[in-house]
Amino acid sequence: MYAMKSYSRLIEEELPDIKMNIKSHNFSELTEIMLLGFQSSPGVNLLIFLLLLVIYCVTICVNLLIILVVSSSRSLHSPMYFFLTQLSFSDILLSTTIMPTMLHVVLCEGSSVSFVGCLTQFYLFAASETLECLLLTVMSYDRYQAICNPLHYALVVDLKFCLKVIILFWIIVFLVVFMFSLTMSFLDFCGPNIIDHFFCDLDPILELSCSDTFIVKMEDVILVIPLAISPFTIIMVSYVYIITTILRIPSVTGRQKTFSTCSSHLTVVSLFYLSLFTIYLFPSEGTRKKILSLFYTVFTPLLNPIIYSLSNKEIKQAIGKLLRIKTSMF
């Protein structure tokens, strides 16, 4: 009994010191993160800033143009172009998530963001990239149905199907990525609070953590399978059937005309996945990693609408018609 009282008295005496020690080691007190950017000379940074600013403005404008053209032209009211507008929404979200912070980091030769802001940027970035994977998948399914099952296309891929798929995609993406980001937020972060990058990507954030990141990394691997690898597999299988069907068309003109309806989508898929797999399957550090990251964060949102508008006659005609209407109003 005496021993228990002595032990209790010892705990009471040591408790303030224990609380102070825990408070001093509260690693989650990290409130700001410094993004280093490209670490070039002021003159080079200014040129990079101007180039990125032009790219950002053009990206927003061309994606908004695609949305406007498809919405205003009745001839483009089909599932393929409906999914294209969703892809443009996704590209606008990605650019708006990454580019403003990047421009500020480049102009100021490094800049700090709040820890919450960094996690929010990663959340929106991951959501937009995942959404693009799913959109490219359903667009390949649309092309598969249109080319391989043309008689049943209108029954299978109708407006109700498109709306259900898009709503489901948005819900799944934002809920799944939110749960993953929430898991990351429970980690302890002790610093240093410096990220040698121009935005808050997964690996740089985890490098700041003092906790065991095994669960987060395993969750990332598990989620990649249904949200990236499986969509890519579905796209490849769809195009095997599509190409097989096209090769069976007897006339050369017929083959070229049919392939032209999916060539732009295939180009966008190749561009997106090539840059994505390169950065994640062959990890690199420093300047090389930043340059590779530019492809799927900066150039892909810019090139997607340009590829569709340049290689698609219907979109070019709709853009020309819209411009003629606007100019005649003035």
Image: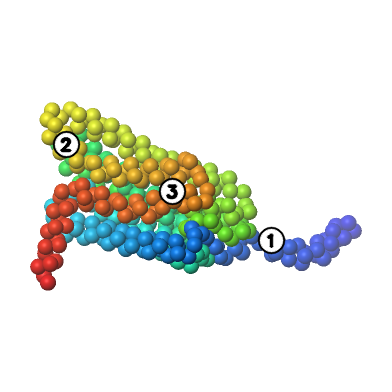
Q: Name which residue type carries label 1.
A: His
**Residue 254 in view of the camera:** yes
- Element under label 2? helix
Sequence-earlier tag: 1 or 3: 1
Q: Secondary structure at mark 3?
A: helix
Which quadrant of the view contains residue 191?
A: bottom right
Viewer-nearest residue: 156 or 208: 208
Tell me which numbered mark, 1 or 2, is placed earlier along the sequence. Answer: 1
Kind of residue at badge 3: Leu
Q: Position of residue 171 (x, y in %)?
A: 37, 53
Q: Amino acid at mark 2?
A: Gln
Q: Is residue 92 left or right of residue 33?
A: left
Residue position marked by numbered label 2 in the rendering: 256
Residue 96 visible in rendering: no
Q: Which mark is residue 45?
A: none
| Secondary structure category for the residue under label 1 | loop
